[in-house]
Amino acid sequence: MQNKYFLKAYFLLFILFISFGAFAQDSRYAGIEIGSKGIKISVIDVNNIKKGDYDILGYWTENVGIAKSIAIDGNLAVEDIDNAGAVVLSNLQKIKSQYGVIDENIYVVASSGVAVADNKQTLIDKIKTLTNKDLDFITAETEGKMLLKGSIPPSDYQDAIVLDIGGGNTKGGYVDVLNGNKFEFFPLKLDYGTITLTEAINKTIVIPRETNDMQVYKEKSFEYSPVLREKIQQMLKTKPLSLQKKKLYLSGGAIWAFVTLYYNSNNDDHFVPLKMEDIINYDAILKNNFVKYENLAKTNKQADKVINTYSQKHLISGNTILIACLESIPDLKSKKIYFAKEGQIAWLVSYVVDRSKKIKNNF
């Protein structure tokens, strides 16, 4: 009798094993990105990576800020590292159980905004201990290249510039054809992002009790604008060819927030056309009528997600960077500006490309 039950149990386990084996697919890939403002998780099913043919099976964000203490003492807080490690572990398990992604097809990376921490090795050790995964740090230059490679049409490579406004910095770049027909990537980097600009402005407020005063913050933000514009102009002048590109592809949380709050539409297009006039109008609402978006968040799930992810100060800072970047580009009216909606998974797509033995990179 015992042998009979044993055989039944063994048979059931065998069926479960076969079922899981059928569910776990080599064509599925996942990425966990530890960013300055949160942890982003992406899951894709690749049909033909060479042709950019893939489906997004899942994408979500965990609001775990890890880089907020870097500006204070140059280090990631131990508590933030522990929280990030726990979130990475739980999502790693979720990716395997719910999406059937095999372990070797799951990548864990940290953004360039996190990489500047003096104690980043502590984060590396934490992730390794909890997940047995190696943590890669993506430099701003690599992020820009991955963004271009993974989020804009290859036909636009030669005529476009890409910029991503992140939490810790702004990065991007463009390509030019050199040495025959080979693409060469030229990176762009600005050491200001949504969070770091907010912190820089807060430091200019000398009276502690005024730190939470929104009117004071708006005034200080305006006063800080010349510093920001000078930094952006310096960035662009080092790569003058960037100013000649006819198309601008933008990504990052600040752009996502703008599109979600201002347009308030379910646009399924991969690339959403943007207008400078709309961005300026949005800026006025952020500063003078923010309650409009707070009310919108009560009935709109996507708007609620934005409001829960970013404070009013962060939204103002992100849009300040956006406006300053666009105003620094000559003859802007002749350019086409797009929000690259899938910019958030560009690094993962690029990782899959780079790790495919069948693909030879162009740049």
Image: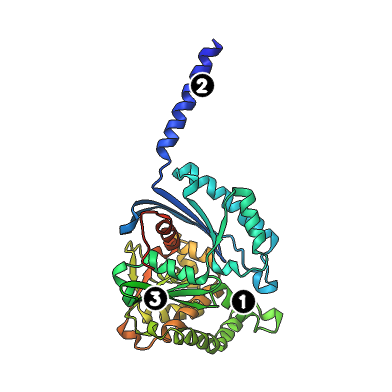
Nearer the camera: disc 1 or disc 3: 3
Q: What residue type is labelled 2?
A: Ala
Tag 1 secondary structure: helix
At x 36%, y 72%, the residue is: 183
How dense is the environment of label 3, judged by Cα within 10 Å: few (below 14), some, or many (20 and up)?
A: many
Q: At which x and y percent is residue 168?
A: 56, 72
**In the rendered image, the vertical position of residue 216 relative to residue 146, given as above or below:** below
Q: Which of 350 and 42 is in front in this view?
A: 350
Instruction: For mark 2, give the secondary structure.
Output: helix
Q: Earlier in the sequence, mark 1 or mark 2?
A: 2
Can you say whether 72 is above or below 88 in the image?
below
Residue holding disc 1: 199
Q: Name the residue under label 2.
A: 9
Q: Distance between the residues labelled 1 and 2?
A: 59 Å
Name the image colouring: rainbow
Work out which quarter of the rendered image holds the N terminus and state it: top right
The residue tagged 3 is 174
For discs 1 and 2, the disc positioned in front in the rendered view: 2
Q: Is residue 223 visible?
A: yes
